[in-house]
Amino acid sequence: MKRLVLTLLTTMAMLFMLTVVPGSTAELQRKLAAESTIEQIIQRGVIRVGMDVFVPHAMKDKKGELIGFEIDVARKLAEDMGIRVEFVPTKWSGIIPSLIAGRFDVIIGGMTMTTERNMKINFTNPYYFTSQGLLAHRKMSEGFTIDDFNSPEITLVARLGSTAAVTAKNRFPLATLRLFDDEPSAVQEVRNGRVHGMVAGQPLPAHSAELAPETLMAYPDQLMKEPISFGIRKGDVDTLNFFNNWIEITKNRGWFEERYNYWFGSLQWQELVQ
């Protein structure tokens, strides 16, 4: 008798699960979808993009308008979605905490995917790759190989909170490293001869040396190859799925390559900012 009762109870429980749980699961799925960042963006009609100003990813033209590779990426994304884009300039050292706090929806700003960052936020698939390079003051580094910069007598600069700073510490551990909130100030330190060089993501070293060859030089060595991705808050599968699919579609159409060649492979855009 007890066995029969247990069997009946088990059967009733299974029937309950089959009838109630699916409905609850569907409701939960609808709730999660409604709360996803991508759904909120669509309902709002505006995507808020966190970024920092650094050349040629994001900068201001002669009219004070934002231009650059990452600016093009964000505007293309918004255009394909049929919505507006709102840029939220944020200091690089605080851009991840600002994303987590909800000040904007996504980071589109040349951010390298790293293990440390990935423990705090999620990353999309890479939409391009970059590398770290070394910009040096020509006179101060005359006759130097790149290994000569790893010395206690050398002072280097990098942007605070960047992977360039990590690369500088790892590649040149004996050198003194000074950190700046923005890259233009760091480049100016090198141009003025107050430091020996600067570690930064390409094409900044190459472009800076090309614009001031009498003062600056760029070493051809690739210090580190890095994947660049969008950054989003954790726990949002729908948003991650949407951005990954958009990146793949746009990459296959050759749009990223065309914009990359314009902003990173040439200096045609210089006339827009000077």
Image: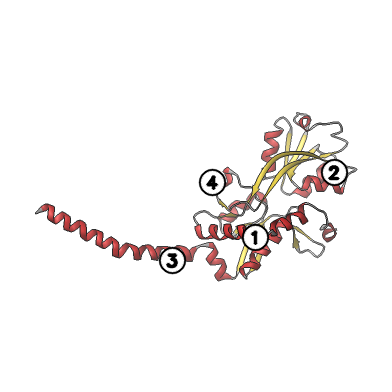
Residue situated in front as seen by the camera: 174 or 67:
67
Point 62% across, 58% down: residue: 247
Q: Residue furthest right?
A: 214
- Name the amino acid, label 1: Thr
How far is the residue under mark 3 from the one under mark 1? 28 Å
Residue at x-position 71% and y-position 55%: 257
Amino acid at the residue labelled 4: Met
Q: Is the residue under label 2 in contact with that under label 1 (CB below 8 Å)? A: no
- Choose mark 1 or mark 2, whichever is in front: 1
Residue identifier under label 3 = 30
Q: Quadrant of the N terminus?
A: bottom left
Residue at label 1?
250
Q: Residue furthest left?
A: 1
- Per the image, label 3 sits on a secondary structure element best described as helix
Label 4 crowd (10 A; few <14 / some 14-19 / many >=20)? few
Nearer-N-terminus badge (2/4): 4
Mark 2 element type: helix
Quadrant assignment for the C terminus? bottom right
Mark 3 or mark 2: name the one nearer the start of the chain. Answer: 3
Q: In this figure, which residue is indicated by the disc labeled 2?
A: 191
The residue that appears at 67% across and 54% down in the rendered structure is 109
Observer-side mark, 2 or 4, equals: 4
* Between discs 4 and 1, the one toward the N terminus: 4
Give the numbered dot on residue 129: none
Residue at x 50% of width, y 57% of height: 237
Of the two numbered discs 4 and 1 in the rendering, the one whose residue sits closer to the viewer: 1
- Tell me which amino acid carries mark 2: Arg
Dot 3 or dot 1, earlier in sequence: 3
Q: Which residue is mark 4?
A: 119
Question: Which one is nearer the viewer's eye here, 273 or 229?
Answer: 229
